[in-house]
Amino acid sequence: MNAPNLPDAFTCQQAFALLYEYLDKALDGDELRLVEEHLAICEGCTHHFAFEEKLLDQVREKCRSTRAPEGLRRKITQLLDQL
Amino acid sequence: MEERASGPGDEAVDRQEFERLLSPILDNLYGAALRMTRNGTDAEDLVQDTVVKAFRFYHRFERGTNFKAWTLRIMTNLFCNQYRKTEKQGEQVDLVEEGDEDVWIWAKAWGEAGNRIDFDPVVNVLSKIGHETICRAIDDLPDEFRVVVTLADVEQFSYEEIAEMVEIPIGTVKSRLYRGRKQVQKCIWAYLQEDQVQL
């Protein structure tokens, strides 16, 4: 039996409301199970969730491609020499 | 807790150890600083200030724990307290509200798809979103949203870690992340349209 404020099964809207907590692995217990059960039977939501996950992956990958300027490493070494 | 007074030999060991931990994360620190400050000069200053503070307090770092998280916490604190400038003119972005549902790239992409049977949002849209577009979209966020999105989406910290680093409740982390991410999607789509990217 679920927690009193939870239904027996999620609608697309209810599952989508927890999209980011699901993708951020911040869900557990009944809410996680209800989202997973919904995704298991709803192809539309499965595709949408997968897209949102890929979008987050893309954001991370593109932002992480930034490299510190070479001069910065030198400046830091000099800074630490002075401390 | 009584702190052990450091002796003359300790400093050299500490410095070596500190630099060994710092070197592999310097790109992360710079990348995060760049997203927070939005310009290279300030980002370099923020990284340097962070390194100085982190080295000064290195004796408080618990060996074996997450050095990157510890250092980024220092950086976040410095940014929030010293680097945040008053919002620039014209920076009053029309930030999405929690209930705004027409900003999702997914929905907009399918709206553009029309009758195309071969349309795939991953191939037709996602692959067209480049580094510059993403950075612009994040940089457009107001400070408090940009910091949380950077910590979550670039550095993958948990809600709890972000709450601790930014000193806000977890509920506020979730709310800022939710609205910030939707705003990023809204901006990305706007830039794709502006740049007339063929989907």
Image: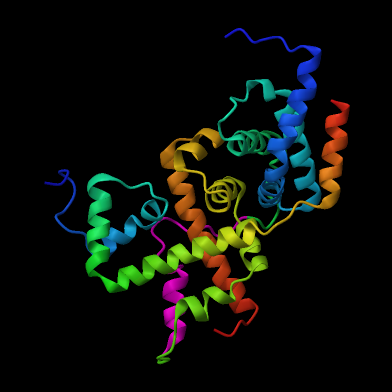
- Judge by depth and name the residue closer to the eye, B76 or B22: B22
User: Looking at the picture, how far across and down is residue B109, in whole percent?
Assistant: 46, 78
Question: The C terminus of chain B is located in which quarter?
Answer: bottom right
> Taking A75 as reference, is B103 above or below it?
below
State which region is magenta. B92-114
> Taking A50 as reference, is B113 above or below it?
below
> Taking B3 as reference, is B86 above or below it?
below
Rendered residue at 67%/59% (across/down)? A65
Residue B34 seen in the current view: yes
Q: Which of the 4 image quarters holds residue B137?
A: bottom right
Rendered residue at 48%/76% (across/down)? B122
Question: The N terminus of chain B is located in which quarter?
Answer: top right
Left or right placement of residue B101 versus residue A68 in this view? left
Rendered residue at 27%/57% (across/down)? A35
User: Looking at the picture, how far across and down is residue B56, in whole percent?
Assistant: 74, 24
Q: Residue furthest left?
A: A1
Magenta segment, prevailing SS (helix, strand or loop): loop
